[in-house]
Amino acid sequence: MQHEVTLSALRNTLQDLRQKRMSIATLCQTWRSQQALLAALPPQYTTVMEDLLGRLEAGSLFTEESCSFSQIDLLATLDTWLDKAGTTLSRN
C-alpha cells in the first residue's frame, strides 16, 4: 500500500511538471529521494530511472525541444516506468 501511494505521488509530480507547477530539478530530487520504493524494486529500475532523469535534466538546458532530449517523450517514458514498477511491486 505504501508503494502505491508513492507511485501515485510520483505520477502527480509528472502532471505538476507538465502543468508548469514544478521544476525539473524538484521533480528529479523528489524521484531520487524515494529510497524505500527503489529498494523494493529490482536494481535495473534505479538504473533506468537515473538515465531518464539525467536526460530530462540535460534537456532542460535547451530552450526548445531537442530530438535527443524531448521532454514530452521522457515524461511519457517515466509514466511507463511507473506502470511497470506498479506491476512489478504487485507481483511481490
Image (spheres, helix red, strand yellow):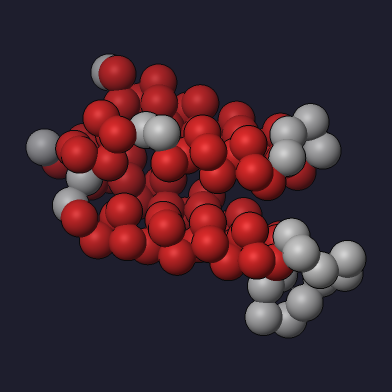
Where in the figure is residue 59, as x and y percent of width and height?
Answer: 70, 66
- The answer to whether residue 64 shows anywhere in this view is yes
Corner quadrant of residue 19: top right
In the foreground, 7 or 63? 63
Q: Is residue 27 above or below residue 76?
A: above
* Quadrant of image for the N terminus: top left
Q: Is residue 40 left or right of residue 31?
A: left
Q: If the image is split into quadrants, where does the C terminus sit?
A: top left
Residue 28 in the image: x percent, y percent?
A: 55, 44
Q: Residue at x 32, y 61 (%)?
A: 47
Q: Is residue 73 visible?
A: no
Residue depicted at 30% across the width and 26% down the height:
3
Of residues 35 and 75, the one nearer the viewer is: 35
> Where does residue 44 sit, x and y in percent of width and height?
24, 61
Label tally: 0
Residue 70 is situated, as x and y percent measured from the top left of the image, at: 71, 69
Q: Is residue 44 left or right of residue 26?
A: left
Q: Residue at x 40, y 21 (%)?
A: 5
Residue sitting at the far bottom: 67
Q: Residue at x 79, y 31 (%)?
A: 21
Q: Quadrant of residue 34?
A: top left
